[in-house]
Each structure stands twice: as structure tokens, then as C-alpha cells.
Image (cartoon, rainbow, N blue to C red):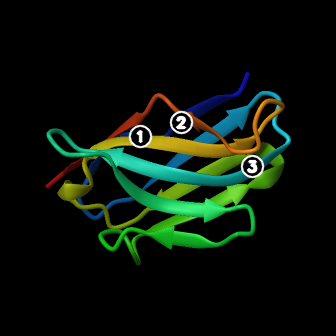
């Protein structure tokens, strides 16, 4: 079985930085892509950033230039460096991993979420 666990959320003031981590563990043949989503109260979950196995990245317009997604392939871990945080970044951040497992070539796994709160 594969598990995906996020960490690194917290409460910060606007303009400060946080780094989120997401580690995948279990029987993993390879990781196809890893994504960060977020969901603010009363809003739909939105895709924030994506990184593929080839290193290609993509960002939501609202975070371009402020957030950076990266991976440590040896650790099956993805990071989200969030700089110049704004109150509107407040949300629960979820990691989503597309993984080649023993059962499927493109299996999706979600983490439990980590709260990020940005005060003004």
C-alpha cells in the first residue's frame, strides 16, 4: 500500500515564507507526477502546482513567481516553497501523487492535508 503524508503547514504573517513537504512511501515503481492542491473554506479545491517525472512544472496564475515546486526523487518527496504569502493563500493544502504501483500504472493517492494560515 502507498501512503502520502504532508507536513510543514502553520500560521505565518503575510509576506513570510513556508515550505510544505509531501512524502510518498510504500511499494512504488515510479512517480509519474506530484501535485499540490489547496482548498479554502467555502471554495472548491484548486490545483496550485504540478511537477512531472521529467521535471516539468506548472503553476496556478495566483501563485506564479511566489511558489516553487521541487522534488527529491531519492526520497519520493515533493516540496512547495511558498514565498511572499498572502492572506488569500490561507487554505488546507493537499498533496496528490500519480504513482506507478504494483497494481496500476497511474494510481492516484491523496494526503490528509496540512493547514496554512496567513495573517494580515
Q: Quadrant of residue 54?
A: bottom right
Tell me the residue that label 3 is attached to: 31
Residue 102: x, y in percent? 84, 31
Q: Quadrant of residue 89?
A: bottom left
Q: CA distance from mark 2 to mark 1?
A: 8 Å
Tell me the residue that label 1 is attached to: 9
**Local SS, label 3:** strand
Residue 6 is labelled as 2
Residue 86: x, y in percent? 23, 61
Question: In the image shown, does 61 or 116 lie closer to the viewer?
Answer: 61
Residue 56, can we see it?
yes
Label 3 crowding class (10 Å Cα cut-off): few <14, some 14-19, many 20+?
A: many
Q: Between disc 1 and disc 3, whose residue precedes?
A: 1
Q: Residue at x 19, y 45 (%)?
A: 43
The C terminus lies in which quarter of the figure? bottom left
Residue 11, can we see it?
no
- Seen as rendered, the residue at the extreme front is 104
Q: Nearer the viewer, mark 2 or mark 3?
A: 3
Question: In the image shown, does 23 or 97 lie closer to the viewer?
Answer: 97
Question: In the image shown, does 69 or 45 lie closer to the viewer?
Answer: 45
Q: Is residue 98 left or right of residue 46?
A: right
Rendered view: 105 above or below 110? below
Q: Residue at x 74, y 31 (%)?
A: 25
**Local SS, label 1:** loop
Count of marks overlaid on the render = 3
Disc 2 and disc 1 in contact, CB within 8 angstroms: yes
Amino acid at each position: 500500500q502507498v501512503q502520502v503524508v504532508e507536513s510543514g503547514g502553520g500560521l505565518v504573517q503575510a509576506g513570510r515564507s513556508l515550505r510544505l513537504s509531501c512524502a510518498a512511501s510504500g511499494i512504488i515503481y515510479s512517480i509519474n507526477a506530484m501535485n499540490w492542491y489547496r482548498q479554502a473554506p467555502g471554495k472548491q479545491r484548486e490545483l496550485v502546482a504540478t511537477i512531472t517525472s521529467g521535471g516539468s512544472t506548472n503553476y496556478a496564475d495566483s501563485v506564479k513567481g511566489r511558489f516553487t515546486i521541487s522534488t527529491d526523487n531519492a526520497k519520493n518527496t515533493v516540496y512547495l516553497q511558498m514565498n511572499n504569502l498572502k492572506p488569500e493563500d490561507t487554505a488546507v493544502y493537499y498533496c496528490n501523487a500519480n504513482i506507478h504501483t504494483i497494481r496500476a500504472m497511474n494510481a492516484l493517492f491523496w494526503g490528509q492535508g496540512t493547514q496554512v494560515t496567513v495573517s494580515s
